[in-house]
Amino acid sequence: MLKGKHIILGITGGIAAYKSVSLLRLFVKAGAEVQVVITPSGKEFITPVTLSALSGKPVISEFFTANTGSWNSHVDLGLWADAMVIAPATASTLGKMAHGIVDNMLVTTYLSSKCPVFIAPAMDLDMFKHPSTAANLELLRSYGNHIIEPAAGELASHLIGKGRMEEPENIFAVLERFFSEKKTMEGKKVLITAGPTYEKIDPVRFIGNYSTGKMGYCIADEFVARGASVTIVSGPVSVKPKNQDVKVVSVESALEMRDAFMERFEGADIAVMCAAVADYRPEVVADRKIKREKDDIPVITLVKNPDIAAEAGRKKREDQILVGFALETDNAVANAQDKLARKNLDMIVLNSLSEQTGFGVDTNKVTVIERSGTSTTFDLKSKVEVAKDIVNLISEKA
Ligand code: CTP
């Protein structure tokens, strides 16, 4: 998968820099062309001679080459690369990358690059736990960078905790997977519903639910990473897509979600219905705040909301793929199968509800049931990983 790929390997000043040598060897062995860019403090930990001997290219560290005075163009490098991997990434480099402080060749190259960027942080456990590191990582994630989380274990300080750079083999595997999955969805248009809906009672109150939209947004990011063009019709949520190419259409109520979705459904190749749409809405929305009046308990009469998935199922063409979600507390599989048939879905993702799954948490455990009856149960994973599993199954049909 990495044969012929152009990779910038960024190395910063941390003990884990010795592991970058193994990572470099793995890339070179796989047939990739690697350009090492090292920060000045990185050179305190590993010598450029070793790195240039293994990569077959002079290592770049300064803006100018000392003996010839020639200029190392960070712009050309940024355009040359198919991927940039920064391993190890120290807390200081993370901060500079997150805030655009370009005082060395590595961060300058990062800012000029147009390719996917993979960051493998490495630092002491307390530095990793510090809110500023967490905030910088969150910012870097929100810019679409891939963070390869550090592992837990014994650190250079002999303290035990999270902060160890992920092993070179695992970083290599992330890159391999990325290139094998990427672009398989090029040209596909994907429409996703996500989040809750709010059904107005009066100007200050609504009926809603605990959905946070995380699962739908992870699926959107995964489709974009594989080259699809993606629109999320989203209820009120605080999450944002990590990838800026995801288009978000914000709505509030089920009726608004239905209109925004149906307007776009005909042009979609794949629709994934992740939203927790309120089944009912108040029949009448009070135009003023409902006041607490003595002895008078208001009654809110509800009416049915449209079933967006079922409407899409009725209008679906042969060449469109429609995927639904289900969260069941009883007879889960039978109920999900029934929903799949009733709404004319091609696939239904059955969520389980526990402390580690469901609303608001970062992990999920799903069973995917296909129209053919095939069902696949996955382990408990992060929602990012669950999104990959779901998109893998959808892409087999697309
Ligand atoms: N769905 C939808 N519009 C609705 C209700 C549900 O598009 N008004 C979609 C959901 O996004 C999900 C699937 O239908 O993909 C199943 O949602 P769920 O709430 O489990 O189904 P309901 O039909 O509401 O069934 P019930 O609440 O009785 O379990």
Image (cartoon, helix red, strand yellow):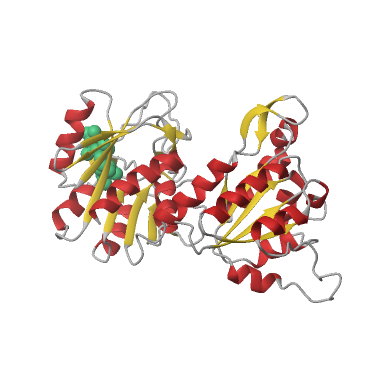
- Can you say which quadrant of the picture contains the N terminus? bottom left
Q: Nearer the viewer, residue 331 or 4?
A: 4
- For the point 39% across and 55% down, the residue is 223
- Image position of 225 with respect to 366: above or below: below
- Whereabouts is ligand 1, in terms of quadrant? top left
- Can you say which quadrant of the picture contains the C terminus? bottom left
- For the point 29% across and 53% down, the residue is 395
Query: Image check: 84 left or right of 220?
Result: right
- For the point 17% across and 57% down, the residue is 316
Q: Position of residue 292 (x, y in %)?
A: 45, 31
Query: Image check: 123 left or right of 261?
Result: right
- For the point 28% across and 62% down, the residue is 268
Query: Image check: 166 left or right of 381?
Result: right
Q: Position of residue 233 (x, y in %)?
A: 37, 55
Q: Nearer the viewer, residue 258 or 368?
A: 368
- Image position of 323 with respect to 109: above or below: above
- Image position of 319 with respect to 141: above or below: below
